[in-house]
Each structure stands twice: as structure tokens, then as C-alpha cells.
Image (cartoon, rainbow, N blue to C red):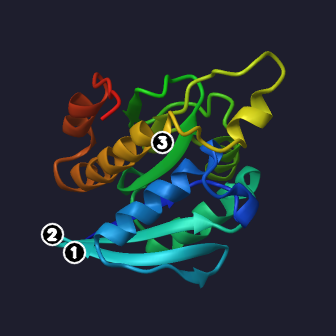
């Protein structure tokens, strides 16, 4: 049975729930819920085990803060003993508009502190990432307030649609591979349902 590590990045704590920066947690929870799994408290993360079409997924939401995500990622990656290409990290991306999702086999952190920490711990940028566009609709100097802010009522329908699409992307990543999935995803522009 093929094994995969899915890492949804975010900040633990009720004050961070439903914020743009926690979209990785939201996608991870939607994936686990769709496949009738449940999270429990594990080492450095909330952890769920899901089986789907002959594949085994370990899904983590680190309980470290975002900028220390690498420690949790590395622990579970080492525990599973799988290739980095069988991991998928789910993150928010201000450099992408809200209408976009981008899947990449490798690439730099691009200013994302959670990815920076994973790269520092792993010593490489060559691991798959799903980047969920959150846009950059904030005044100069207010980036932190924007990413740590909650979605607006106008954004929520599109966010929910993109979470569903992100769950499908995880399934495709594990079943048809990253290259084919990238061709299906990276040119899509999602619009309000």
C-alpha cells in the first residue's frame, strides 16, 4: 500500500480558526472528513490516518506555531520513511489571487514562514506543495493582519469551493501523480459558485 504524508500548515488555537493563514488546516480537515477519518493528538501535531483506493494517508496539522512547522513535518516524514515526493504540504499563498490554486513538485518558500522552516529542517526545496491563493488585498504594511484575518462573507463561497477542489487535488496527486495533476490544476481559474 502506497503511503503519503499530507501536511496542512497553520497555527493551533481557536483565535486562528478560519483565518487565511490556516487554510492548510482547513483543507486537511476537509480531506479527513470526506474519508471518514478523525484527528487525534499525536507527537507535535494533530494526526489522522485515512485509507483510500489502496493508499494510506497520514494527515498532520502541526501543533507547533507556523514558523516551527519543520519539526513536526520532519518527525512524521522520518516515521513514515517515504520519499519526499510522497508528501504534500498545504499552504496559503499571498502571491496568488483568490481564484487560483497552484501545485508544484518543488520551489522556494516565497516568504512563507512555515515553508521556510520545513526547508531549513529538510535542507531542500524539492518537495511538493499545494499553494492556495488568498490574494493580497491589503494596504501597505498590513500583511500580517491580512493573513491572520478571517475570510470575508464575500470570499467564503469561493473559499469553500476551492477547499473541495483541493481535496480532489490531494486524491489526484496520490492516484495519477503530480505531473498530470499539475496540468489539471495550475491553469484553472475558480470563480464564485
Q: Position of residue 57 (x, y in %)?
A: 35, 70
Relative to 16, say whether 184 is above or below: above
On the image, which quarter does residue 36 sit in? bottom left
Circle 3 packing at 10 Å, graded few (<14), some (14-19), many (20+), is some
Question: Which of labels 2 and 3 is toward the front?
Answer: 3
Q: Position of residue 136 (x, y in %)?
A: 62, 22
Relative to 135, say whether 157 is above or below: below
Mark 2 / mark 1, whichever is N-terminal:
1
- Label 2, secondary structure: give it: loop
User: Can residue 123 be seen from the camera position used here?
Assistant: no
Question: Which of labels 2 and 1 is toward the front?
Answer: 2
Q: Which residue is mark 1?
A: 1
Looking at the image, residue 51 sits to the left or right of residue 121; the answer is left
Q: For residue 127, which numbered disc appears in the image? A: none
List the single residue furthest toward the top: 140
The Cα–Cα distance between marks 1 and 3, rounded to whole angstroms, is 36 Å
Work out which quarter of the rendered image holds the N terminus and state it. bottom left
Q: Nearer the viewer, residue 133 or 54?
A: 133
Mark 1 / mark 3, whichever is N-terminal:
1
Relative to 71, say whether 95 is above or below: above
Q: Which residue is mark 3?
A: 156
Looking at the image, residue 21 sits to the left or right of residue 48; the answer is right
Q: Nearer the viewer, residue 135 or 157?
A: 157
Question: Which of labels 1 and 3 is toward the front?
Answer: 3
Q: Nearer the viewer, residue 128 or 37?
A: 37
What residue lies at 46% left-to-right and 44% top-to-bottom?
A: 127
Q: Which residue is mark 2?
A: 53
What residue lies at 38% left-to-right and 69% top-to-bottom?
A: 32
Circle 1 packing at 10 Å, graded few (<14), some (14-19), many (20+), is few
Amino acid at each position: 500500500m502506497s503511503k503519503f504524508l499530507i501536511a496542512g500548515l497553520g497555527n493551533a488555537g481557536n483565535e486562528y480558526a478560519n483565518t487565511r493563514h490556516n487554510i492548510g488546516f482547513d483543507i486537511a480537515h476537509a480531506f479527513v472528513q470526506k474519508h471518514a477519518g478523525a484527528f487525534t493528538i499525536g507527537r507535535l501535531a494533530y494526526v489522522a490516518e485515512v485509507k483510500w483506493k489502496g493508499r494510506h494517508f497520514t494527515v498532520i496539522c502541526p501543533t507547533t506555531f507556523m514558523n516551527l512547522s519543520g519539526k513536526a513535518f520532519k518527525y512524521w516524514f522520518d516515521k513514515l520513511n517515504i520519499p519526499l515526493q510522497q508528501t504534500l504540504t498545504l499552504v496559503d499563498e499571498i502571491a496568488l489571487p483568490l481564484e487560483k490554486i497552484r501545485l508544484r513538485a518543488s520551489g522556494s518558500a516565497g516568504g512563507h514562514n512555515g515553508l521556510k522552516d520545513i526547508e531549513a529542517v529538510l535542507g531542500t526545496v524539492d518537495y511538493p506543495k499545494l499553494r492556495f491563493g488568498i490574494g493580497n488585498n491589503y494596504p501597505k504594511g498590513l500583511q500580517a493582519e491580512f493573513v491572520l484575518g478571517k475570510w470575508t462573507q464575500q470570499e467564503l463561497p469561493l473559499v469553500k469551493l476551492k477547499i473541495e477542489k483541493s481535496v480532489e487535488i490531494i486524491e489526484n496527486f496520490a492516484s495519477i501523480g503530480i505531473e498530470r495533476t499539475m496540468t489539471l490544476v495550475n491553469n484553472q481559474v475558480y470563480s464564485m459558485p
